[in-house]
Image (cartoon, grey):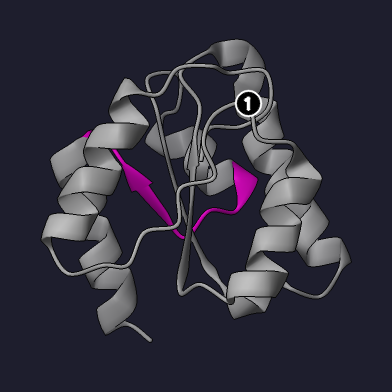
Amino acid sequence: GTVEGDHHDIGKNIVAALLTANGFEVIDLGVDVPVEEFVEAVRRFEPDILGLSALMTTTVPLQRRVIERLEELGLRDKVKILVGGGAVTPDMAREMGADAYGRDALDAVKKAIELIKGR
């Protein structure tokens, strides 16, 4: 999903379509998704990977907040986190504690496959 405050969905939709084409079951939470909705989805669906997208620099801190909230609730070790979006850099992804960074849609799929192999 795309984090709260960000209504951009083209990149997220491309990643979701490519993941589906590569055999992943995708639960798309949509755009402008509040932190607690991501947390509830991790509890409810127990996904292998949580994808967080942010196209705007103003919304990148919300990616970090989702990760922090999962840590606070003891859920962080239950899910791998893949971040991406036009405003995100590899350094930002590392600093926020993401497991992987997708530079573009194809790279996001590659990273998702690597994350699953690592489980």
Question: Is residue 76 something that shows in the picture?
Answer: no
Nearer the observer, 28 or 113: 28
Task: Provide the residue designation for mark 1.
Answer: 32
Quarter of the C terminus within the rendering: bottom left
Give x and y (percent) for residue 80: 49, 68
On whether residue 55 falls in the magenta region, the answer is no
Which residue is at 12% across, 57% downward? 21
Which residue is at 62% across, 44% downward? 96
Nearer the observer, 68 or 12: 12
Chain part drawn in magenta: 96-104
In the image: residue 34, left or right of residue 49: right
SS assignment at label 1: loop
In the image: residue 6, left or right of residue 76: left
In the image: residue 25, left or right of residue 78: left
Q: Is residue 90 above or below residue 110?
A: above
In the image: residue 58, left or right of residue 29: right
On whether residue 98 falls in the magenta region, the answer is yes
Q: Residue furthest bottom?
A: 119
Q: Is residue 59 above or below residue 90?
A: above
Give x and y (percent) for residue 29: 54, 45
Assess disc 1: are there few (<14), some (14-19) or many (≥20) residues with their C-alpha within 10 Å of its C-alpha.
some
Nearer the observer, 47 or 56: 47
* Image quarter of residue 78: bottom right
Count all numbered tags in the image, as a single digit.
1
Which residue is at 86% across, 68% downward? 73
Q: Amino acid at mark 1?
A: Asp
Give x and y (percent) for residue 95: 59, 43
